[in-house]
Amino acid sequence: MRVTRRAVLAGAGAALVAPGLVAPALGTSAAEPLSRPVPASGERVPAVGIGSWITFNVGDDPLLRAECRAVMAAFFEEGGGIVDSSPMYGSSQAVIGDALATLGHPQGLFSADKVWTDAADGPAQIAETARRWGVGRFDLLQVHNLIDWEANLDTLAAMKEAGRLRHTGVTTSHGRRHEALEEVMRRRPPDFVQLTYNIVDREVERRLLPLAQERGIAVICNRPFQRGRLPDRLAGEPMPGWAQEIGVSTWPQFLLKFILSHPAVTAAIPATRRVDHLRENKSAAFGPVPDAAMRARMAAHVRDL
């Protein structure tokens, strides 16, 4: 069977809960979407969130904003979860705020943004970010790409202590600055880290993901599709027959399920401006979670294509 990123598969939901599958690993249920607890608070969050880099940076274009609102509406219909943005992402924050206001600030939002400036300017930037979102308190604020991380973490910790923030975090991307992120995690562990992890970018499995488990740090995975390169690369390849054992029928589901099956991972945040892609991404949280042997099989299969 040939499937592509753009396929809309009738009956996909039935395939995800096909009879005869073994009980899902890691305590998940085939009937309920996977969620993971945040160690710092115990709160459970859906394992598939949404990012906004590039896709939501649409300025004032009314048609593109409408697409973003439709994606956000579908996101909350599918259970919501982490919505991630940054001051770095152009108009994305304002687009998110517009969608939230239009949708009536629906339940299920785990609001996640970043501080992306020197610490002296951090409070003003955070205030502007909150204005753009239209929220009074963020669920998570993160130091973006470790910029002035110690002083910015001081700001976030003070906000959390005062009840003006629920969780603190630090991010990196592009597979960069892992040694610096490890230093943060060992010396001053935040509630969350955000890093790049996918089926081919796996360096974080060696030290960072085990360290997150050890220190009780939640993990958000960015670039799950390598900005679309992985689904595009795999689009012409047939899905292996054994993929039905983990309840997947498309490559994006396959790629996300691999990420979510790592026990250190709290959530992945694929970005999209298409409702069908959003629903496809969310569907990866259903069905059996691959065990270690299946994870190895999945990675080897993609490596060898």
Image: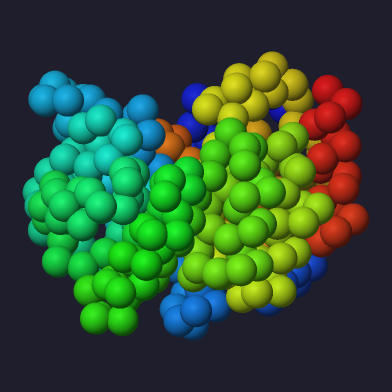
Quarter of image, res 291: bottom right
Quadrant holding the C terminus: top right
Quadrant holding the N terminus: top right
Left or right side of 39 for 85: left
Left or right side of 244 for 75: left
- Is residue 108 at least partly visible in the picture? no
- Is residue 187 at least partly visible in the picture? yes
Q: Look at 11% across and 25% down and name the residue there.
A: 60
Give x and y (percent) for residue 209. Answer: 70, 59
Q: Nearer the viewer, residue 246 or 119?
A: 119
Give x and y (percent) for residue 63. Answer: 16, 23
Give x and y (percent) for residue 212. Answer: 66, 66
195 lies above or below 112? above
Q: Nearer the viewer, residue 69 or 172?
A: 172
Q: Look at 25% across and 36% down and name the residue there.
A: 92
Give x and y (percent) for residue 81. Answer: 39, 60
